[in-house]
Amino acid sequence: MKYPLLKSLLSLGTIILACSCSDDKAPNNGGEFSVIPCEDALYVPAYGYLIYTNDNKVTDLSGNQIGKIVIVGGTNYVIVKDMAGNTLINQLNTADPSVVTHLAGDPVACNVKPAAQITTCDDARLMNADKNYLIYADGAVTDEAGSPIGSVVPTVNQSIVNMVDLYGNPLINGIDLNQYPIIIKGDGIRYKILEAAYRWKDATGNYVVYNNTTVTDPSGKMVGYIDFATGIIFNKELTAALTTVDVATLMQPSSVLQLNSRCVDYTAPVVSSSSVYNPPVYSSSSVYVPPTPSSSSVTPKSSSSQPKSSSSAPKSSSSAIVTNKCPTIKTKGGGGSGWATRYWDCCKPHCSWPEHAHGNYSKQCTNKGQNESSDWSGGSICSGGGLMTCTSQIPFTIDGCTEMGFAFAAVPASNGGDCGKCFQLTFTGKGKYSTDENHTYIKGKKLIIMTTNIGGDVQQGQFDIMIPGGGVGMFNGCSSMGWGPQGEQYGGLLSDCEKEKNYKPKATLTCLKEKCASVFSNDSKAKQGCLFLAEFMHGAGNPMHDYVEVECPEVLKSRY
């Protein structure tokens, strides 16, 4: 989530909820933060921390709890520890004005957002820490969408528990449940789904919305179709509107029903005929919006936005594979300005499905992204199948061509027919939310991208670049890859480094290089792709660009 003017939003029980694509939390352009906490707090500018001495909590500037303080008895010093008990700052002098600033809380000026609506089938305690957790009476822990995270283990003090992941590894120690009194009342509703989907509940009913526009009730009975462009759910006959949904809210993580969610009863579909199609779940940063199967009055986008044929992929011989010089890029026309985000969710690409590729398939792989597969009807790893993004589609450069890079990307869902199209992005030297020396360093550099995916939350002018470690987004198919932690869900390793280094450009860049080397130590291709963000793009988060459609160079076509 982006905060052009960051404010602390921490308030007991308040939920901070947003969905975006490969975002950075950024300082304002002046390089200083405008911090208005809801309660009296100590601000530590060097780290971007807020310390609340009434309950010893430590949060980031967005109000997410990242740890606690331990007071050194009889002194003004405290030790700042993370949620697992590891030391973040050793002996911080809270009385030193050069280190800590005392801020008066203002519950009105901090503009606390209202609690987000979280629903679950069973009663659960809501814990707002580094992210939202739901803790159930049986000890299970899920995220706000109901996907399993782990469990809590009681300590000698029954009100204090430790949280562990699904494998028993520690996540958060010393949780005082009394500090999290909000209970989300279970509604008793279970969902029968065939694949990952979205849920929507309003006064007219409870709906399950699939990426192929089909809408069912929780029992799995079909009730109609959704027009993603307008948010209108129509009945099966397409003669009447049942309700209208807020598509942006629908696509937030808390609305996603994953196959293993607590309130889901998943039954794998039985395919008896090749005419039966099991729709996929697409890119994390990208939610597929296909046409409705019937009346054009409900078609989310015009037919012109759908894949036309394999001819939509440039066939020009604009460039043969070359080394020691940049390929010649020929402009086709049509462009504008925008910005670049990043993601890598490992899911099967949108352009690897027959109904989108029209014979011009983007590569798909098995075996940790290593082995290419021609099983085009096979399922995505993000919806229980075995097909995923190939690691050969990492971003790359060519020897002797230092000012031009090459990558694959997702474009807006409304550009659903852009499979195989190419665009040239020329970086302006500015960032969308803030500008620092990492952005100015890449001014004038060009990135040639080829479209393999689309995104429901990707906006016009935005290109979501496929970069390992760029953030898994909404759907995470990377758990089988054997990689290390992928960083923030939206923003990945770079977002982690920006926070850790208080948005200092040089320190952030060094941190990113170290994380790429560590996280992908067992996968040289993924490591190379991650370092593209650090080296060619110089760690610039959400850089602005001018773009134009171009003929695809052979160096991209050969990897598509």
Image (cartoon, rainbow, N blue to C red):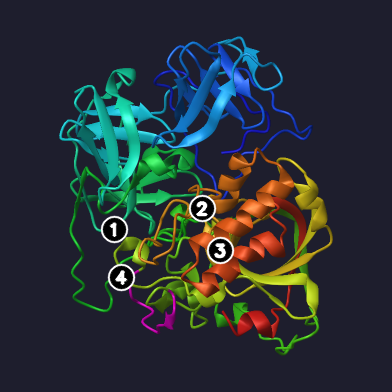
Front residue of 460 and 160: 160
On the question of residue 63 being in view, the answer is: yes
Vertical placement of residue 112 versus 516, above or below: above
Q: Residue at x 58, y 64 (%)?
A: 530
Mark-to-mark CA distance, 3 and 2: 32 Å
Residue 12 shown left or right of residue 324 in the figure? left
Pointer 4 residue? 277
> Do tag 3 and tag 4 residues touch (Cβ < 8 Å)?
no
Quick one: SS at disc 2?
A: loop
Q: Nearer the viewer, mark 1 or mark 3?
A: 3
Q: Residue 277 location in percent, x, y? A: 30, 70
Front residue of 359 and 5: 5
Q: Residue at x 52, y 61 (%)?
A: 518
State the residue lying farthest toward the right. 444
**Label ID, residue 505:** none
Mark-to-mark CA distance, 2 and 1: 18 Å
Q: Amino acid at mark 4?
A: Tyr
Pointer 2 residue? 456
**Label ID, residue 517:** 3
Q: Which residues are magenta?
A: 369-379
Front residue of 344 and 287: 344
Of the 4 image quadrants, the one containing the C terminus is bottom right
Q: Amino acid at mark 1?
A: Glu
The numbered mark, 3 or 4, whose residue comes first in the sequence reads: 4
Q: Residue at x 26, y 54 (%)?
A: 259
